[in-house]
Amino acid sequence: MTAPLLTIDHLSVAFRQNGVERRVVDDLSLRIAAGETLALVGESGSGKSVTALSVLRLLPSPPVVYPQGDIHFRGQSLLNADERTLRGIRGNQIAMIFQEPMVSLNPLHTLEKQLYEVLALHRGMRREAARAEMLTCLDRVGIRNAAARLNDYPHQLSGGERQRVMIAMALLTRPALLIADEPTTALDVSVQAQILALLDELKRELNMGLLFITHNLTLVRRIADNVAVMHQGRCVERNTSSVLFSAPQHPYTQKLLAAEPDGDPVPLPADAPVLLEVRNLSVAFAIRKGLLRRTVGHHHALHTLSFTLRAGESLGLVGESGSGKSTTGLALLRLIQSGGEILFDGQPLHRMNRKQLLPVRRRIQVVFQDPNSSLNPRLDVQNIIAEGLRVHQPTLSAAAREAAVITALQEVGLDPDTRHRYPSEFSGGQRQRIAIARALILKPELIILDEPTSSLDMSVQAQILTLLKTLQARHGLTYVFISHDLRWFARCVIRWWCCARGKWSNRGHATRFSPRRGQTTRASCSRCVNSEGVMA
């Protein structure tokens, strides 16, 4: 019998602070052979990412300790290896795609510099040969016009494009083992399929082992040979993919597989007035070149979008990564310069300066895609949620602000006693609830939701969307729902627009692509595809 590529034997991982040891992974055992894909699934906070980071010894010690167990790669212990040995393994033999691409990419360096650094360090390539390899890999992961994008910085890319660059960076090293921690979180279904096909191709080509960490069970069904289910730090079920999906044994596994969207969108009152009117909205970014950074052209990220939104209505904006969805949201918020007209409750936002916009901003709030980046890690939850009150209601007393924070936390289903904790002490789903509470505390009329469930597991996604619908019905909220995940659209939005390369070319009623139980997201997408074949 062939020896496994990676062996995890009875591993326990704990965080030790002030003499108190808190275990986050307990007695975990896994095996990955060369050419095998093992999917690690479970809800946020179950210990999946901690396990992945432990393989490469990337967790800070202290406070991290390993009370028991060991990790072997090709028969060599990683927990007992010295730093020099680990440096030879990291990147060269084991590569990792991290969950947070904006944190992992250096914001001060161009894509070319960061990709070349990987090839020079791990494969000893010269710049000319490295450039050709970079362009090939970027094209394979779905970066359009790769040659022109090499000089871009990470902030100039969309969330999905940054994720694709991270995938390319990991694949350039041609590792024996690839650890992919939520590699498709920010990607639309068409790019997801492209990435999965690429990973499968490279796995066969290099006989590469793959540890695939995700909450998307549809992807697990397609790519995984074996599946391990984690719950509260323990592996509760382990089996082949076909057996686990057809006959799950553990109640938690059954719960995960049953986590499907249900219900209908909150109905719109017949006499609801128009709240938001958009006419010919467009966004163009200047292209600057040369020593003096002169403008030589413009990149049109959004072309002439027009729509009306009634009070209490939910509008869905759907499209592939980089199509202009988030740009549309930022333009509606007047956070980036745009052309066209934006009328909110009859007020021309496009003519207002920053001071004039301040009273209106209280009525329009946003929940960003990544709560890890949008929540200040140096502030506790009390101060994060109360920040809007200090700006828009400066005369409010400290006691009144605290009372408002407690009410907001209760509305989103969080314990008010946790308000003095910091964001790092919460799971991904809890952080998203905090972001919703921060938006809700100002009692807005319109909330722009930019991928509010993209980084959450299926069960928590269902909880967040149920919460959003409950809040909408209770407070009469109006939503602009930005997403690439169509599974939830038919349950949350009344109307939708489909975007392709900055052009909003297809629209309709959500019931047109209502996914029935058992259908794949891809099948649902085929019913809202535009003429260019986006999302198909």
Image (cartoon, helix red, strand yellow):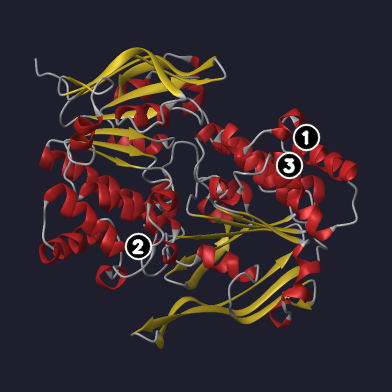
Q: Is residue 526 something that shows in the picture?
A: no
Q: Kindly identify the amino acid type of the residue bearing the numbered disc 1.
A: Gln
Q: Alpha carbon of mark 3 to alpha carbon of mark 1: how far?
A: 13 Å
Q: Is residue 114 above or below residue 507?
A: above
Q: Position of residue 504 (x, y in %)?
A: 50, 71
Q: Foreground residue, 36 or 422? A: 422
Q: Alpha carbon of mark 1 to alpha carbon of mark 2: how far?
A: 43 Å
Q: What's the mark number on residue 358?
A: none
Q: Alpha carbon of mark 3 to alpha carbon of mark 2: how far?
A: 44 Å
Horizontal relation, residue 74 to residue 362: left or right: left
Q: Report the residue marked by disc 3.
A: 470
Q: Give residue 450's quadrant in the image.
A: bottom right
First of labels 3, 2 by sequence position: 2
Horizontal relation, residue 334 to residue 232: left or right: right
Residue shown at the point (55%, 15%) measured from the top left = 19
Q: What's the mark number on residue 410?
A: 1
| Circle 3: element type | helix
Q: Foreground residue, 418 or 192? A: 418
| Circle 1: element type | helix
First of labels 3, 1 by sequence position: 1
Q: Foreground residue, 453 or 409? A: 409
Residue shown at the point (73%, 42%) measured from the top left = 470
Q: Kindly identify the amino acid type of the residue bearing the numbered disc 3.
A: Thr
Q: What's the mark number on residue 109?
A: 2
Q: Residues within 10 Å of mark 3 (few under 14, many from 20)?
A: some
Q: Residues within 10 Å of mark 1 (few under 14, many from 20)?
A: few
Q: Is residue 501 above or below residue 464?
A: below
Q: Is residue 256 something that shows in the picture?
A: yes
Q: Foreground residue, 476 or 88? A: 88
